[in-house]
Amino acid sequence: MNPGASLQAVHQAHIGAPILQLEGISLAFGGVQALQDISFDVREHEIRAIIGPNGAGKSSMLNVINGIYKPQQGRITFRGQTFSHMEPWQVARMGIARTFQNLALFKGMSVLDNIMTGRNLRMKSNLLQQALRLGAAEREEIAHRERAEEIIDFLEIQAWRKTPVGRLPYGLQKRVDLGRALAMEPAVLLLDEPMAGMNVEEKQDMCRFVLDVNNEFGTTIVLIEHDMGVVMDISDRVVVLDYGRKIGDGAPDEVRGNEDVIRAYLGVAH
Amino acid sequence: MFYRENGQFKTSYRADQQILPIRQDRLLMAGLLVVAYLVVPWVASDYLLRAIILPFLILSLAAIGLNLLVGYCGQISLGHAAFMAVGAYAAYNLAVRVPGMNFLLVLLLAGVCAALVGALFGIPSLRIKGLYLAVATLAAQFFIDWMFARVKWFTNYASSGSVSTATVELFGWKIETPAEKYLFLLSVVSVLALAAKNLVRSHIGRSWMATRDMDVAAEVIGIRPVYAKLTAFAVSAFYVGVAGALWGFMHLGAWEPAAFGINVSLNLLFMIIIGGMGSILGSFFGAFFITVLPILLAQVPAMLGFNLSVETGSHLELMIFGALIVFFLIVEPHGLARLWAIGKEKLRLWPFPH
Ligand SMILES: Nc1ncnc2c1ncn2[C@@H]1O[C@H](COP(=O)(O)OP(=O)(O)OP(=O)(O)O)[C@@H](O)[C@H]1O
Ligand SMILES: [Mg+2]
């Protein structure tokens, strides 16, 4: 047995019960039906891909999970708690983090500060303690700085720690976006096209980071990706969306053979 | 000794997180404080203190306050002079109605009153942004102006509507002469400026800046918009309220509601635009600039032998402000503070150009 396969076996063994379940999610913008009665689940520790042609509703799906969009119908169950809508900050505090298709970094802040902001939801010192920088506030800041530095090391962006994010090249900005989400230490990480617009080398790096996050921290990952090679390589199960409907769901090999999926992708080169 | 951080390695995060990580900057700051405390009170004339230095210090504090809201949290307010008024009248009423209250406590409570009113008028920011928010804060300005002019209780039923303050006493120290006022203000402003700096480099400051830069992403990483925006309004109004109380007690002595009109709000905005949005240091630059420019315009032409009428002087002042604001908004939105930073960067490289 080669080492890759055994790693894969270990990974498979770790996959647990569903941590996130979506039932009958429907979302419309005026006349546009972005999502129509979508149901699927995500198991603990797995890498779940969402694929589909442009405008299929993939990003909208993540926005619903995040609470950015409020679905007209449907329910979400996360770690046994069922709800139809929560505010984004509540979702974040429950343990769901997210990166964005179009970078949404805090442009006026440094790499370090962007990542530190991901720690905000765990920081407790009150206004007065912060204003006076009392011992407790200083200690808290340093403790979280250490966690932020671990992430900076992990993503290999030490050299840009103090650089304003706006000055970084695109590929590095994508990494910072991931870093900010990782800083939240989420149970589930939603990645919206983390490799879009990257060259082959950058894609490989990003793939490695995603796999490492999944392996080392046990983070469950929901990944939107257009690069079929990547999807087939790293995901455990795939959901296929087309025009807001779910047309396929299963292991990468099953999905690849699915006729609806082949039809949806015909003529759409990715 | 070159201005450089070379060789000043940071061995702990605590050291790396200092306000002034470069040693030369720390020395400069220490020198500045020594001069401010030990030299200025002896050499500055009463006129210089009264006309420039005292208003400069108080306006710096107000500019810091507005900057926390506009420059750091990205919200807009055209009504900040109204929060100054709240601070001034709160302090006045406390001093009149609770005789003998410690003036520091008066200031603190005046700030807290302003903070509450600021948070209240910050509520629209949860729903609206930009121009609409600007108009909503303008409403705060007009409402509060009206309130202090019409509700006689606030002015202790003074027949003229004008209120006047007694000499401030602190732990038996009568703060009377300009030099004494200066030392008192310097201390208050230094402490509050330090606190503001601490806030903006803490997680509360990061939540403000995140809200400013990308509000959706801020919420997605767990920042409550209600909390971020309302704390920004409250803290901002606290600073401005304390500044208002100081303006009343230490600068004006006696004032009417018109003292805190819309033109003061606009002046505060000019200060942070010229000084630098999102910079505590810039707030000082802006306040200094706005305090000094009118005086320069009044005096320099005369010294050079021109005879400018008062009217021409004030027209000139408006034109210069206008031009500068357009310049900074278009060319350098981070104001004088940014020019300062660029200068330091150049100095760091000097004498080697790269
Ligand atoms: N805020 C919005 N307002 C109006 N329509 C929207 C909004 N967000 C998404 N849509 C519409 O919903 C549909 C799905 O969009 P979505 O962004 O989810 O697609 P996607 O699968 O992520 O596509 P892509 O691969 O291009 O990122 C599209 O028709 C889009 O125009
Ligand atoms: Mg998308």
Image: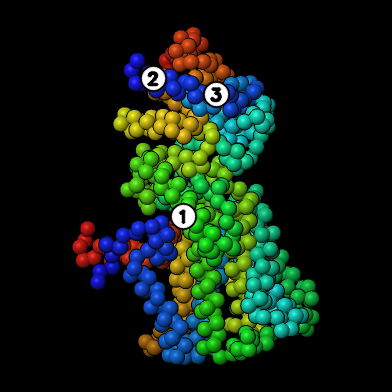
Q: Residue B16: x, y in percent?
A: 39, 59
Of all chains, the one bearing label 3 is A
Q: Determine the residue positioned at 51% across, 50% down.
A: B210
Front-most of B60 and A176? A176
Q: Quadrant of the C terminus of chain A?
A: top left
Residue A16's label in the rendered image is 3
Q: Viewed as shown, does residue B2 lie left or right of B25? A: left
**Please, what is the three-letter code of the amino acid marked with disc 3?**
Gly
Mark 1 Cα shell of 10 Å, populated few (<14), some (14-19), many (≥20): some
The residue at which mark 1 appears reads as A142
Q: Viewed as shown, does residue A176 lie left or right of A189? A: left
| Dot in front, 1 or 2 | 2
Cα separation between marks 3 and 2: 18 Å
Q: Height in image: B292 above or below A152? A: below
* SS at mark 1 in the image: helix
Q: Residue A133: x, y in percent?
A: 52, 63
**Please, what is the three-letter code of the amino acid marked with disc 2?**
Ser
Q: Residue A102: x, y in percent?
A: 46, 37
Residue A1, visible in the rendered structure: yes
Front-most of B317 and A204? A204
